[in-house]
Image (spheres, rainbow, N blue to C red):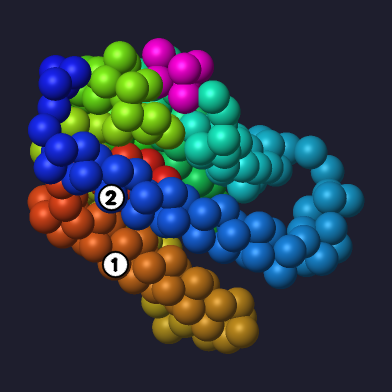
Amino acid sequence: MNSTVSDQALASILQTRRITSYVEAVNITLLLYDYILTLQLEVQYVWGSRWSLITALYYYTKYSIFLDGLGVVFQTFVNPSIVTVHCRAITIAGGAIFVSGTCAAEAILVMKAWAVWGKGRRLGAALLFIFLGAVSGLSLCIGQFFKSLEFADTAYALSAHLTGCSVTHAKSGFLVAFWIITMALDAIVTLLLLIQGYHAFKIGGNQGLLRLLYRDGLIYFIYMAGMSTINVILIYNLPPGFLLLTGLYVI
């Protein structure tokens, strides 16, 4: 962005930064609230359990999001002369944490489906192939999205006393593809869970366990599909300055 930007453009950027700051504050507050609500159950059922791959993935999925929160605080409160110079590096670091956390959560879901189906080798190989393909697609999409990002000119941002990183241009299609891939993987794994649950129900399996499987599987998929759809709609309709919210921080 040229340093001789019009007052109208400056007003637009300032408004965008104010709104994103509010949304980020709400996200962090809800994150802490959710952590407090579930801490007792986590202490009771997880902290004392034997360490395993699933346990490690769980901890990373849950606590990596706090690193995103630290990034938001860093952008908001650290001296703009430090933040604006490193906007791309800060954004890429936050995106890498988010994507790796997403992949860890998806890995837990895939392993759950594999276990429900009896841990067969063929299904395990198929699920591994699908999972690695999805991870590759997600990484490619987010990498191309980062390459397309353009931020407010550093000298201009400092002269205007802008806090945080202001995106002025991005190729939003890569974020849309990111959420479509995530939704497709969730759909495949959830379908496997529901099919096996239905078969077990037909032969008179554990009714309470089956109800829990159906309920949790359906609720999770409906939630993720709904949030992914909302993200896609927002990505197509919001200006570039809000894309980092819809793509990396809201979910």
Q: Is residue 84 magenta?
A: yes
- Residue 226 - label: 1
Residue at 50 percent of width and 46 percent of height = 105
Residue 85 figure quarter: top left
Between marks 2 and 1 in the image, the one whose residue lies nearer the viewer: 2
Q: Is residue 208 magenta?
A: no
Front residue (pair 65, 157): 157
Q: Could you say where residue 180 lies in the image, as x and y percent from the top left?
A: 20, 48
Q: Could you say where residue 223 lies in the image, as x and y percent from the top left?
A: 38, 68
- Residue 15 - label: 2
Mark 2 closeness class: few <14, some 14–19, many ≥20 residues within 10 Å: few
Given contact means CB atoms under 8 Å apart, are the residues at marks 2 and 1 in contact? no
Give the residue type that dot 1 points to: Gly
The reply to whether residue 119 is visible in this rendering is no
Q: Work out whether 160 lies above or below 236.
A: above
Residue at 63 percent of width and 64 percent of height = 34
Mark 2 to mark 1: distance in Å? 28 Å
Residue at 71 percent of width and 69 percent of height = 37
- Residue 145 - label: none
Which region of the structure is painted magenta? Answer: 80-85
